[in-house]
Image (cartoon, rainbow, N blue to C red):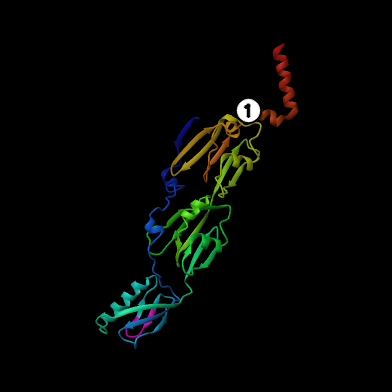
């Protein structure tokens, strides 16, 4: 087996393309001990002020993210957690000279926003009731299509970086990464991508990767109708680009088919190129006439 490497495109055009995915591994991010609700437009909130019983307005968060409260006017609360909003309201009451040490408790009595949004290769808005898990939400959204990636990205308010989990194709792996989902989360199910078959395959072109099991070279070749008679079986080339680096690996597809070499797992954007043997290609294109022509030449040459 031989390996060769050459430079990819220029830095300006290749930077950031096809970079490796960084899976989130921090348990504190994947399985947080607690997660406070956040306020959004449309939420109906009852404000309780202790020890006073006269101040208990029920206010809906307006489209601009504010609540109109007695004594202090508009308070911006959109995107704040319940404790954060309680502190903002208490500070406003203090700064307005209304109370010295007000104890504010917010009660979310109605909310159309207790949902998670699923987008990408799957589109759905899923209500979040009680404790919900990733697989539960994806199931309600219709499940993961066979052409979708099992690497799921979750954007969560309050986190600087998205959460990235790999559900894989093994049920044990999926259960291990079945993380909690909270209201306001956006779950992105990306398309798995394609691999490209070129050269002496019966059918060439792009083939979608199906991620219900590892997508190997033999599976791709089978979907392409198999290698043609004219292919150089000992010189198949697997071309993979990561960022700015492109690598070419030479494989013997005949040995792989016969089980003598490992069947490599393909990744999105891999290029599989099977060169043609010139003489075999000529025979294939010329049919029986070409074969008889070669036979006549051999007879003349041996006289």
Label 1 environment density (alpha carbons within 10 Å; few <14, some 14–19, many ≥20):
few
Asked whether residue 61 is in view, the answer is no
Whether residue 300 appears in magenta in the rendering, the answer is no
Q: Nearer the viewer, residue 63 or 56?
A: 56
- Placement of 50 over or under 295, stated as above or below: below
Asked whether residue 251 is in view, the answer is yes
Residue behind mark 1? 278
Pick the quarter of the image with the C terminus: top right
Instruction: Describe the element under mark 1 as helix, strand or loop.
Output: helix
Task: Determine the residue positioned at 73% across, 22% down.
Answer: 293
- Identify the image quadrant of residue 294: top right
Task: Determine the residue positioned at 50% across, 51% down.
Answer: 172
Q: Nearer the viewer, residue 275 or 266?
A: 266
- Placement of 152 over or under 255, stated as above or below: below
- Identify the image quadrant of residue 99: bottom left
In x, y percent, where is residue 258? 60, 32
Q: Which residues are magenta?
A: 67-73
């Amino acid at each position: 087996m031989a390996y060769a490497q050459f430079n990819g495109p220029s830095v300006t055009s290749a930077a950031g393309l096809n970079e490796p995915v960084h899976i989130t591994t921090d348990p504190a991010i994947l399985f947080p001990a607690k997660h406070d609700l956040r306020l959004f437009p449309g939420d109906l909130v009852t404000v309780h002020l202790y020890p006073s019983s006269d101040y208990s307005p029920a206010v809906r968060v307006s489209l601009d993210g504010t609540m109109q409260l007695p004594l202090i006017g508009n308070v911006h609360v959109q995107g704040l957690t319940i404790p954060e909003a309680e502190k903002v309201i208490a500070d406003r009451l203090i700064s307005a000279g209304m109370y010295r040490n007000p104890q504010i408790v917010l009660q979310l009595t109605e909310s159309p926003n207790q949902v998670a949004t699923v987008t990408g290769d799957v589109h759905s808005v899923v209500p979040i009731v009680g404790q919900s898990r990733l697989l539960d939400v994806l199931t309600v959204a219709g499940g993961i299509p066979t052409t979708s990636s099992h690497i799921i990205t979750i954007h969560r308010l309050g986190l600087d970086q998205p959460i990235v989990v790999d559900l894989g194709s093994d049920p044990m792996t999926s259960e291990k990464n079945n993380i909690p989902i909270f209201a306001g989360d956006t779950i992105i199910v990306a398309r798995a991508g394609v691999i490209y078959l070129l050269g002496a395959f019966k059918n060439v072109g792009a083939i979608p990767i199906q991620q219900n099991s590892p997508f190997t070279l033999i599976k791709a070749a089978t979907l392409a109708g198999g290698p043609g008679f004219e292919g150089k079986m000992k010189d198949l080339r697997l071309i993979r680009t990561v960022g700015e680096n492109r690598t070419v690996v030479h494989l013997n597809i005949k040995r792989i088919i016969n089980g003598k070499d490992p069947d490599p797992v393909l990744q999105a954007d891999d290029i599989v190129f099977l060169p043609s043997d010139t003489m075999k290609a000529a025979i294939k294109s010329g049919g029986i006439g070409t074969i008889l022509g070669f036979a006549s030449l051999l007879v003349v040459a041996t006289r």
